[in-house]
Amino acid sequence: MNDRTLVVGEALVDIVHRTDGTVEEHPGGSPLNVAIGLARLGHHVHYAARFGDDLRGHTIRAHLEREPNITLTRGTASAPSTSTATATLDERGAATYEFDLTWDVANALDGEPTGHVHTGSIAATLAPGADAVLEVARRGHETGTVSYDPNARPTLMGDPATALERVEAVAANADVVKASDEDIAWFYGATTDATGTIEVDDAMRRFAELGASLVVITRGDAGCRVYVAGTGEWADVPPVENVIVMDTVGAGDSFMAGLISGLLDAGLLGSADARAALAAADLDAIMPAVTRANVCAAVTVSRAGANPPTRAELPS
């Protein structure tokens, strides 16, 4: 059994503009946030990304090196410069993004087998690095399990129909797909109703037809919707109650980390045998991981920035 967990995806500096006029810079990128979330939950993570040997790159490296469970792959810190994402927060704490990003990750990847691979967001759709990410997902699917969060970024991904081709190519190699209802609306052109389930359900079935055993769609303050493909079970899971929202930056990534963590601990990710177990799992077997994901997201939104919880902060 290979227990290597590899996270592949962009590392950048978030430049956050708050409603009070203040501007803050801190490390970000959806896959980076997932890697840190998993590390804080006690999982050793190999992280493949691209950032520069510059001031912002040094900030990212220092941020990652504070997490003892993260190992950077060779070549990760060799980009000509470090990418940025400018996030503007509205009065609800929701963020819109503009990016200055070059993505070419091939030099940070190796051919070592993995137990589990996670990828998503810009990394899986933006050329030229997207081809290398797709190949990593294909190899990961051969030796273990794969999770994927498409994480729509319209300002970088261009035409949604074109981006969807890449999304579905990666999803075809994934055992777990997690997305938001906003992602589904952009990629598939869906307009959700008050419950957010009609068009979302069609997209969830589509991901299952491509091969995912578990599909989870987050719906903000409406919680999440879960589809277990092997048993055909559906569930609407409410969010954690009585959470005071500071902002939503990194909430979806923290949810993703919690979901992966719970599934790894349950033996439903991390190997070819785990893939078979996930394919045969029922909703009862899945729910502890979904609960962990919800709690991780709730902790993150209760404090500023993408700051996922440690395992010690989770309910026992």
Image (cartoon, helix red, strand yellow):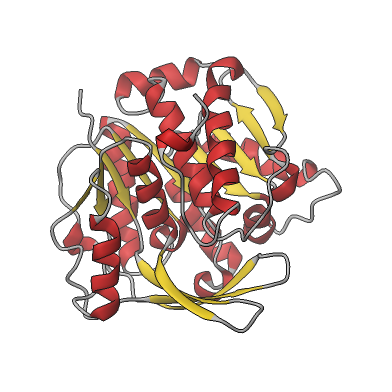
- The residue closer to the viewer here, 73 or 288, is 288
In this image, 190 relative to 11: left or right?
right
Counting from the top left corner in percent of width and height, residue 121 is at 46, 58
Visible residue check, residue 80: yes
Give the mark count: 0
Residue at the extreme right: 194
Location of the N terminus by quadrant is: top left
Visible residue check, residue 173: no
The residue depicted at 65 percent of the width and 80 percent of the height is 20
Tell me which corner region of the image, top left, top right, bottom left or bottom right, holds residue 152: bottom right
In this image, 237 relative to 272: left or right?
right
Location of residue 139 with respect to 303 vertically, above or below: above
- The residue closer to the viewer here, 146 or 283, is 283
The residue depicted at 35 percent of the width and 76 percent of the height is 83
Counting from the top left corner in percent of width and height, residue 120 is at 43, 53
Tell me which corner region of the image, top left, top right, bottom left or bottom right, holds residue 52: bottom left
Counting from the top left corner in percent of width and height, residue 212 is at 50, 33
Location of residue 195 with respect to 166 vertically, above or below: above
The residue depicted at 44 percent of the width and 63 percent of the height is 122
Counting from the top left corner in percent of width and height, residue 36 is at 36, 50
In this image, 122 relative to 10: left or right?
right
The residue depicted at 50 percent of the width and 73 percent of the height is 156
